[in-house]
């Protein structure tokens, strides 16, 4: 359904996976990868958005590198090696590309795990364009990269797992309190009896079909409300 494309990224180029609805148009969504890279699961998420009527682009923040899901140590190394400034430029370029290809002047951003934190970063960097942000079991994992949320104009819908040791419900609720204190619109959903990455259907050891369905339905509703 989708294709790999190249797009402008602050004077150079970046790549990504683009999926477009059969109608050819629709509101735009940026999909931010987990720490595994731009793997099949992320491309599939873009395809699902396209099937639901959205133009979806997942920027390849690792520039071609993909980690096998059984190698978390390698994924951790790849995440730490990623240049945040470069990733920010690539994500901002992806926003401009989606705006060019979609209807409307706003986009939604969804990210998973590491990408959930990066989705929040992007919302603070592009308040002109990001109207809705959906972090899925992700909070910004870099202590020295905490963004200034004051400028963020996006509404936030966060999906978190009750049994997540990486990004705990307590951490998610603390983030929500921080954002609400700044007057932001925030809803946090904690999914009972679920593990980190419960939406990833390529990982049967953590995938939870019921929670994944609920996450998807509420996300589509949220993006539709804020982008159309």
Image (spheres, rainbow, N blue to C red):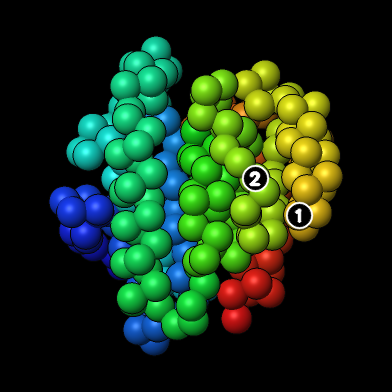
Do we see residue 108 in this rendering? no
Answer with mark 2 or mark 1, whichever residue precedes in sequence.
2
Q: Residues within 10 Å of mark 2 (few under 14, many from 20)?
A: some
Cβ atoms at labels 2 and 1 below 8 Å apart: yes
Query: What x and y, as percent, mark residue 138?
Result: 60, 35
Query: What x and y, as percent, mark residue 140?
Result: 57, 32
- Residue matched to label 2: 149
Identify the residue at image location x=52%, y=23%.
Answer: 144
Up/down of 53 relative to 180, above or below: below
Identify the residue at image location x=77%, y=57%.
Answer: 185
Q: Is residue 23 left or right of residue 181?
A: left
Do we see residue 174 in this rendering? yes
Query: What x and y, as percent, mark residue 42?
Result: 41, 48
Identify the residue at image location x=64%, y=60%.
Answer: 154
Which quarter of the rendering shows the C terminus? bottom right
Up/down of 98 relative to 14, above or below: below
Q: Which is nearer the eye, 49 or 176? A: 176
* Furthest-bottom residue in this view: 23
Up/down of 24 relative to 186, above or below: below
Query: What x and y, as percent, mark residue 197?
Result: 57, 34
> Which numbered disc covers residue 184?
1
Could you tell me which secondary element the residue under label 1 belongs to?
loop
Q: Is residue 86 left or right of residue 185?
A: left
Q: Which is nearer the eye, 167 or 41? A: 167
Q: Quadrant of residue 136?
A: top right
> Which numbered disc covers residue 41?
none
Up/down of 51 relative to 111, above or below: below
Q: Residues within 10 Å of mark 1 (few under 14, many from 20)?
A: some
Could you tell me which secondary element the residue under label 2 belongs to?
helix
Identify the residue at image location x=21%, y=59%.
Answer: 8
> How far separated are the C-alphas under marks 2 and 1?
9 Å
Which quarter of the rendering shows the N terminus? bottom left
């Amino acid at each position: 359904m989708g294709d790999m494309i190249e797009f402008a990224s602050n004077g150079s180029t970046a790549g990504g996976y683009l999926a477009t609805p059969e109608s050819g148009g629709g509101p735009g969504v940026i999909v931010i990868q987990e720490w595994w890279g731009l793997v099949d699961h992320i491309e599939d998420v873009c395809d699902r958005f396209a099937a639901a009527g959205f133009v979806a682009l997942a920027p390849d923040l690792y520039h071609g590198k993909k980690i096998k899901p059984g190698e978390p140590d390698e994924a951790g190394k790849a995440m730490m090696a990623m240049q945040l400034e470069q990733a920010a430029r690539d994500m901002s370029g992806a926003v401009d590309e989606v705006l060019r290809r979609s209807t409307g002047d706003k986009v939604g951003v969804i990210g998973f795990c590491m990408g959930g934190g990066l989705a929040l970063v992007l919302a603070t960097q592009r308040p002109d364009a990001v109207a809705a942000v959906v972090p899925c079991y992700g909070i910004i994992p870099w202590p020295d990269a905490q963004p200034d949320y004051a400028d963020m104009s996006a509404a936030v819908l966060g999906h978190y797992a009750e049994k997540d040791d990486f990004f705990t419900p307590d951490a998610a609720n603390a983030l929500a309190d921080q954002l609400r204190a700044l007057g932001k619109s925030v809803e946090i959903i904690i999914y009972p009896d679920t593990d980190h990455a419960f939406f990833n259907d390529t990982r049967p050891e953590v995938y939870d079909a019921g929670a994944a369905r609920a996450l998807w339905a509420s996300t589509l509703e949220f993006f539709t409300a804020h982008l159309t």
